[in-house]
Each structure stands twice: as C-alpha cells, then as structure tokens.
Image (spheres, rainbow, N blue to C red):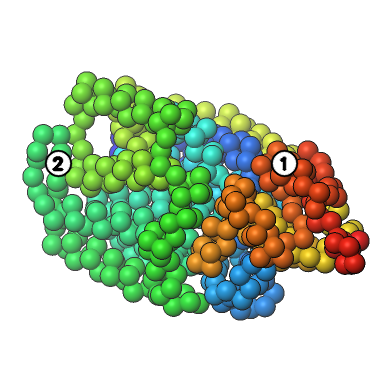
Amino acid sequence: MAASEAISPAISGRRGTLAGWLKNCFSFPVFLAAILAAGACVAAHTLFVDPDTWWHIRVGDLILRSGTWPTHDMFSFSVPGAGWIAYEWLGEVVFALAWRLGGFVGLAAIDFLLAGTIAVLLYVYSTLRSGKCKAACVVVSISLPVLGAFFTLRPQLLGYVFLLTTMILMERFRQGLTKRLWVLPAIFLVWVNTHGTFVLGAIVVGVYLLSGLFKFQAGGIVAVRWTPEQRRHILLVMLLCMLVAPITPYGSRLAAYPLQMAFMQPVNLAIIMEWQPMSFNEALGKVFLAIMLGYFLIQVTLRISYRLETIALLIFAIFSTCIHIRFLLFFLFLFIPLLAEALARWADAYKPEKDLRLLNAAVMALLVFAGVKYLSHPGKIASEFTKSYPAGAVAYLKEHPLKTPLFNDYGWGGYLIWSQMPRSSVFVDGRADFYEYGGVLADYLSITHLKQQTPFLLRKYSIGACLIEPESPLATYLSASPDWHRAYADGTAVLFVRQPQPGAGSLSR
C-alpha cells in the first residue's frame, strides 16, 4: 500500500462526503497519530518552560502593545541601550497572544499543540518513507522520551514544525507530487521571522536539489536524477525562498543572524548547555553511541540502500549533533524514518476493512477529555511553570523594592523580565548575543566562578544585591562576607543585600 494511502485511507467513491470524511478521521492511521500526539503532550508536560520562555513572552507582549519592533535593549542595566533586535519576534508574538488569552493555561495549551504537531508530522514523514504506519508509530513512540526534552515553550518549536513540513514536502516532491512544493516560499517567509532553524530547511532543500543532479549506484547509495521539469521547478521554488528571506521588520538582519551567532559568539556557544559538544562520558552520549552502533549492525545485516540525499543529510546531522547537542532533534528527524523503513519489513500493511472506527473514536474522545481535564486546573499548571524559578523572591522584592542594581542568576533573568519587578532591569538573561559583545557575559562567568576580580566586578556594576541559587559558590562567598547579609531565602533562591556603609543610606527598605 502506498504511503499516502496509509496516512489518508479515503474510500473510493466516498471521498468528499461526510461519511467518508468521518471514516478517515477515525481510521487506524489517524488513531495512531492521536496516540502519538497524546504521548508528546505527556512528554512536554514534564518540562514546559525554558529560562528563555519568559523573556520571549514579554518581548512579544511589548510588540503587541506598541506595534513596533525593538532595536535596542530595554531590560538590562549592565549594557544600557545596547543594540538588539527581536530575531524570533513572530514566535514571541504567538506566545504573548497565548498568555493574553489564557494565562498559564494558554501557554500549556500551545505547548501541547506544538509538541503534538511535531510528533504527528514525524509520524507522517516516517510513514511516507516506510510505507507502513505501524512501523512509523512504533519508532516515534519509542523516541518520545528523548523528543520530550526539546518540547519546552520556545520559538524553536515552531521552527521544528516548519522543518518537518519542509521535509515532508520534499519527500512528496520526490514521489511525484510536485504542485505542493509551491507552499515552501510562504513557509520560509513565516519561518525566517520565527526562528533561525530556517537555515536547516534551506540545507534540506539544497541537498535534495544537488542530489538530483546525479544518477548512479555505488554500493548501497543510489542517486536518482531529476527530470528537467523537476529541476526547474525546485530551482524556482528555492529562488523564491531566498527572495522572501529579507522580508522582515529588520530587513536581511534576521536571515543573517544564525551566521552571526555561529561565528561571532564564542562565549555563548561555550557556556550554554545545548551548544556543548556531545559528551560520550554522559548518559546521553552513551545512548547516542549505542544507537549508532546498533544501526550499524542493522545496516550490515539488512543491507539497506540509501538515496543520496538521505545519506548526505544523515551524515551532516550526525556531525552536527556531535559538535552541538542542540542538533540531536534534527538527527532524530532523519534517523527515525530510517528505523521505520527497517522495521517495515516485518510490519503488516494497513487494511481499512479491519478498522474499528467506533473504538478508535471512543479512545480519541477520551484523550481529548483527559487533555481538557488537565487544562482545567490553572493553579496546578502555574505551579508547574514556576517551580524552578524564584517566584517567592520576586514576591518579596515587590514588597521590598531595591534601590540598587541586582545581580541575578543567568537562568532567572528572563523570569525577572517577565515578572516586571519594580526595578525590572536585570544584569543578564538568555539574550546572550549583546551581553557577549559588551563583555558582560565574560564578567558574569568571572563573578559566578569566584575569580580573583569578583569583588571588583561587583563594584564595577554598582551591584548592591544578588539573587542567586542557595548552593552556588557565589552564595557561599557572600554568606561568609561581612559586607553582605541575607535578606531572603527559600529552597529555590537566596537574596543577599550589601550592608550599608557607615554614613550611607540603606540600600533596601
């Protein structure tokens, strides 16, 4: 059975009728997609937010309120007035709208929606590649615990949706469905305003284009040449995708930002966990290595053949993942369909006549009910969102406003921006680009690592208070210093305030 038939099993003669549509909606392949979407929501529920989530919401809200796009920083005191652009502005606006419409429930709902969409699109792509929806479902479901680590509420989730959509469109184009490729320029227009992952989409399209310029078979690698019409079609579409890239509020600066980050922000790439190289001493690295070795045995045993574009993208994804952990999800988008192809040798084809549509509908309705039931507890959802952030300390600071600059933990800067404290300027937050250019990121590392110049740097920025983790080295240092006293503490955060010097006014009230 063709992959397209496995995904959309419309019955001949009933296509377009309500009865035929309902049969499709409650068919077994769609039922599997619903199960995977529910599993993705469960995986997303364990994390929800990233430290950057908070400032993304605040920036989106500012854009909605002002109708303008920021060109300089307005949240920090360490680099006052530094040039900065909202390079993920469209995703930030989407999250701000979700917050306005539903608060924490709205944020949870859009996180679930995006996580479920990614799981379903990966299932569709794997089914297209393998031709067997059962094999695709098994492989995607096994991968959900790893995929869930990436389901934090950030604009990159929207980027991953666009990336999978691009991969599906290119695969359908390879299978002969050429007209749908005209959607790509519109996708890229939205994508470049949403997240820098559009670069991966451009790489996917480019690799497909170049691979179709050759025709050969070398061992297990097969290159299939495009027809002249296909080549002209994909070239024109790719040109249109390039032409829409500068259509942003900032011109071509958004399109250039991924390159700027790759080559001009070494400190940022060195300290942020997701940009670290794969460590094979850690559990994730060992699992990754085991998967690679296991698939090598599968390849040797089954003698799998690869199209040229598939093996080229896979090699690029493996290399990128070893250099930066962040690309693990891109690797999974390519690797999971290959596993589904291998498993499809033993999976049964979908048989529409054996569908239990009433049972499928009942289970799908139960899943929807469970999701609605979970979202009906806003207090519980709010606690899930804020459990790792200094909500208690922020409440204390709102009752006892500071009159002095506040040094904060890097991971809490976005939360402080979002919470809009009376003195809302932060020392540092997740917008690492301009902090690095201004030297603040290096100073932050010196302070938190208790370098020799730590006392000097605290005076350099006129720091009179520090909001940090209780077990951090800096907290130990400040606890032992007679110049600082502990003004607030709980299990998440501790606030130190500098003792007033003789003859000076109090730094806090």
Q: Nearer the viewer, residue 76 or 202?
A: 76
Q: Please rate how many residues cluster around mark 1, counting C-alpha atoms within 10 Å: few if below 14, some from 14 to 19, many from 20.
A: few
> Which residue does the image show at 55% across and 49% down from the upper left?
114
> Which residue does the image show at 53% across and 64% down from the upper left?
439
Q: Nearer the viewer, residue 320 or 437?
A: 437
Figure label count: 2
> Which residue does the image show at 33% across and 60% down from the upper left?
202
- Image quadrant in which the C terminus is located: bottom right
Residue, disc 2: 222
Which residue type carries mark 2?
Answer: Val
Q: Residue furthest front?
A: 502
Task: Locate residue 462 relative to residue 218 in the image: left or right.
Answer: right
Q: Along the polypeptide, which appears first: circle 1 or circle 2?
A: 2
Q: Nearer the viewer, residue 89 or 205?
A: 89
Which residue type carries mark 1?
Answer: Thr
Task: Locate residue 370 relative to residue 9 in the image: left or right.
Answer: right
Q: Please rate how many residues cluster around mark 2, counting C-alpha atoms within 10 Å: few if below 14, some from 14 to 19, many from 20.
A: some
Residue at disc 1, secondary structure: helix
Residue 339, quarter of picture: top left
Residue 191 higher or lower than 469, as above or below: below
- From the top left corner, tell me how far across and down residue 104 is, in percent: 73, 51
Residue 477, quarter of picture: top right
Residue 257 higher or lower than 279, as above or below: below
Residue 99, quarter of picture: bottom right
- Image quadrant in which the N terminus is located: top left
Residue, disc 1: 476
